[in-house]
Amino acid sequence: MDYYTRIGLLHPEARTPAQYRLYSEESLERLRTIQALRARKYSLEEIKVILDRGPSEVLAEAARLEADLEHLLDTLDDLKACPLDARARAILTTLAVKGMALAQRLLLLLNEQGFTGV
């Protein structure tokens, strides 16, 4: 937490008389989001951009990710209809993994901004 505070990703709500930092529940949720993004190999710069987004930017990014996901799913459907050789199977597997990663990124982005029911 100290590191994320030093680089500006977290902000303590107050300090004790002994100068210990006090964090709010909102800050702890932000920390969980930072940790989840780090686990998904996002850089600290990318995380800062994500955390600093407003709701309209999040919705625009979500729409773009959803369009990318739809395109990947359409490509998967097209490939499933073709006889597959080893190279085609490798491409299909890669597309499936990218589709899952896009879906996870979309859900994380929406959850981080507090969107529910999606």
Image (tube, grey):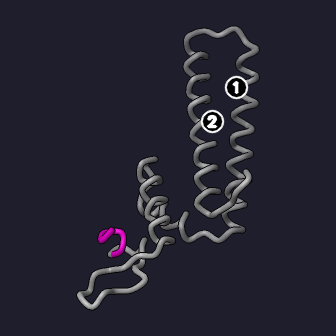
The residue beneath circle 1 is 76
Q: Tags 2 and 1 in contact by the CB under 8 Å rule? A: yes
The residue beneath circle 2 is 99
- Queried whether the magenta region covers residue 110, the answer comes back as no
| x 41%, y 62%: residue | 44
Earlier residue among tags 2 and 1:
1
Region in magenta = 1-5
| x 63%, y 49%: residue | 107
Q: Which mark is residue 37?
A: none
Looking at the rendered structure, the secondary structure element under dot 2 is helix
Q: Is residue 21 left or right of residue 87?
A: left
Q: Residue 115, position in %: x, y? A: 68, 60
Most extreme residue toward the left is: 18
Disc 1 marks which amino acid?
Leu
Q: Residue 5, position in %: x, y? A: 36, 74
Q: Residue 114, position in %: x, y? A: 64, 63
Q: Is residue 85 left or right of residue 13?
A: right
Q: 94 or 26: which is nearer to us?
A: 26
